[in-house]
Each structure stands twice: as C-alpha cells, then as structure tokens.
Amino acid sequence: MAGNSASGGKDSRNMQNKLKTPTARHMLCAALICAAMLPATAGAQTTPKTYTLYLGANISVNLDKSIYPVRDVDGSAWVVDINGQKKVISAKQAPINLKIVPSLKLSEVSATIAGFKKEGAYTFANDPAVRLTQGLGKAATVNASYQAASNQASAIDPSFINTGGTSGSTPSGGTAAAHGESSGAAAAASASSGANASTELMARQPENSGYDALSVEFEISSAKPLQDPYIVTMARFHPPGSEPGTVQSLVFAKALDPIGATPAQVKFSEEGFPINYELVEFQLHLYDGGTEIATNIAEKREVMTFDQAFEYVKTVYLESHKGETMHAVPVMGNMPADLASHFEQGKYPEIVYVRVSKDGLADTVFADSACEKKIEDSYLQSVVKDIRFKPALAQGTPVEGVASLKLSQLAN
C-alpha cells in the first residue's frame, strides 16, 4: 500500500508540472468551458421554436364608402365578405381602391419558400424576340413584293422578239439588246430596293426595349396543409423619366392550388409596369382562407418558443390597454389531439371557468363563474395548464381574474 501511495504522489507531482505548461493550461480551460456550456445548450435544444413573428399585411377593399377585409382570391380578383355573402371584386370591371395596413403578426403555422427568384421580364407585345419575329415577317413580305416586281421587269416583251418583217427585213439586234440591258438594270434596282427595305425594318427592331413585367418563381410547402391558399405581392417601383424619389405601387394577387408537405412549383408574370421601370421594393404575402401565413422570406421574421411568443403577446396587450379594465381571456395554447373525443363523451360542461393569475397562467378549473364548484379532473387540469391568457386588468394593471373557456371550440 505504501508503494502505491508513493507512486500516486509521484504521478500527482508529474501532473502538476505538466499543468504549468501553457498548452496544458489552455486545454484545461477549454475543457471547463465546454463542460459549463453543455447543460445550457442541451436545455435550449429541448424547447422548440414553433411560433413566427413577422411583418404581415391586412388587406381590405374600399367599396361604397365601407371597408371590407379580403377573405379570398378568385383568379386575380378579390373576394370580400359583405353581410355573410361572398362578393367577387374584379379590376376588369372598375378600378379597385385597396387599403393595405402593415402589421406585426404572430403565427404558429409557417410555410417554406425555396428557390425564390424574381427578375425583369417582357410582356408579349414588348418582347424583343416577338417584335423581331414580326419584323422579319414584314421584311419577308416586302422582299416578296419587290422580287415579284423584279421578275416582271426582267421578262422581255414578246414584241421585241425577232419574228421577221413583211419586207423581209428584221429589226436590228441592237434594239433587243438594249431593252435586255434596261430590264436587267431594273431587276437589279428592284432587288436592291427590296434588300434595303428589309435592312431598314431589321434596324428598327430594338435589341432591348426595356422590361415592362416581372417574372416570379419559387417552390412552396407547408407541414400543415393549406386548403385555400393565395398570394399577394406588393411591388414599389420608380417610373422612368420621373423625378428622383418618385415611387409608385403595383399590387398583384394569385390563387394557388392546395399546399402540402411536398414542395409545389409556382411561376407567374406580373404585368402593368411601365417600360424601363426600376424595382425599389418587393413583398410576397401568403394567405389561407383570409388568414395570413408566415413564410421564411417574410420581413422582420423572428422564430420564438411558446413562452417567448406569449410574452410578446402579453407585452403588446398591456401596451394597447393602458389604463383600461379588462376581463381575462384565453389567447394561445397547445391542445392535445384527443381533446375532442373526451369532450364528446360528455365528461365536461360546455363552458368551464378558469382562475387566472396576473401573469396570465391558469390555476384551477371550475364549473361555475363564482369558482365554487371545482372540477376534479386531472386530464382537464393538464389541458388548461397549457393555455395562456391575457390577464385581467384593473386600470391597466394586471390582476388575478376568471376566464371562461368554451371546450367545444378548443376541441376543434
């Protein structure tokens, strides 16, 4: 045992000597730092960021001095809800007065856009290739006309053919020869004129007359299926020849096929720009049945955890209701998939009441608004614990309160 002890002491002194070297000290520090970081990193990875904060747009149509929010898109026409009835508003019928209000939005659903590309393009009438083809067709027609005239001029008049006279004399060969030379000159001049006309038409075709459209393409997918999607693009551009700083806007809408987990190709061309426009800003917004959906290319995008998203909602709520008195209301939560089956079994009343803390957290579930009949059910209690509430306010100050929950709506 003594020998082992002496050996251990020697090894210990050797280790101490080694730690005196710079390399050993640095390695030890690095090991300690890594060890300290591991728990924090592991903890961060266990909390998924399932919410997206982004800059969205609320779009409405100003119709008959009233504002109607857009609920859908039919082709490229807008669909609004007027007294429960859908009405299609098309720009083909009359100019549309749109109201677009930028707004920060929080969404639990997010779509992925890949391979996004936008670039200047031509309308059909302004496409140089089309105009060149049309020019070539016109040149070919002109050339054909000149060639026909040339062929006609090259034909020798039969009256100049040597047929012999009644006196037995014949016309001098010089006359026929002179006419032939004259016809040849006319043919050459005619052909030259045709070639010059063709060259002139070709010269009129511009190599690049300037873009007057915008081509957009991308692939889109969503983990949660979108059954009634449509996109709205907003382009701001500088018109050619206008004063510096002059900006105009062009809004474009397009209905899409249902979107799922498999990426789908989307490609379209926006028209209505002036020739040689300069694109200043471009936004693309995605909607599903009137509800805007976050995308990975949205402006001011920030992904958040459930708790971070709730803190953001609560902060905005308190800022917008300063000095006001409000009841507690549910605002967000993670509902279990089997909640509907539990509710359908008739185990719970249609409406339950939850005591809510001043921080917006659920406490106890009751069957009455007076909070006297407590519901003793561990499953329901766990469901309610995952719901976050806008807390009750007393003159702008968060206080404890009671919120009502309609379970049939939560189960949907």
Image: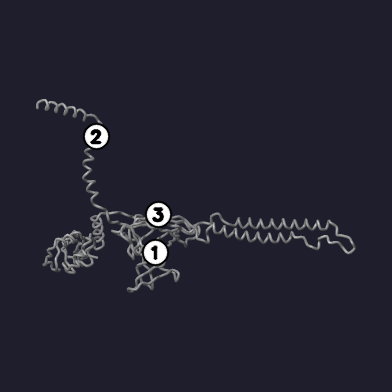
**Vertically, is 285 above or below 65?**
above
Task: Specify the quadrant that holds the N terminus.
Answer: top left
Query: Which image quadrant for residue 174?
Result: bottom right
| The furthest residue to the right | 167
**Quick one: label 1 or label 2, which is nearer the N terminus?**
2
Q: Are marks 3 and 2 in contact (CB under 8 Å)?
A: no
Q: CA distance from mark 3 to mark 2?
A: 45 Å
- In front: 76, or 176? 176
Secondary-structure class at tag 3: strand
Q: Are marks 1 and 2 in contact (CB under 8 Å)?
A: no
**Quick one: label 3 or label 1, which is nearer the N terminus?**
3
Q: Is residue 6 left or right of residue 135?
A: left
Q: Amino acid at mark 2?
A: Met
Q: CA distance from mark 3 to mark 1?
A: 18 Å
Residue at 16%, 64% in the rendered image: 354
Q: CA distance from mark 1 to mark 2?
A: 60 Å
Q: In the drawing, what numbered circle is on residue 255?
A: 1
Residue 106 seen: no
Q: In the drawing, what numbered circle is on residue 27?
A: 2
Q: Which residue position is annotated with label 3?
A: 116
Residue 210 on image: x %, y %: 51, 56
Residue 194 seen: yes
Numbered disc in front, either 1 or 2: 1
**Quick one: label 3 or label 2, which is nearer the N terminus?**
2
- In front: 1, or 197? 1
Q: Amino acid at mark 3?
A: Phe
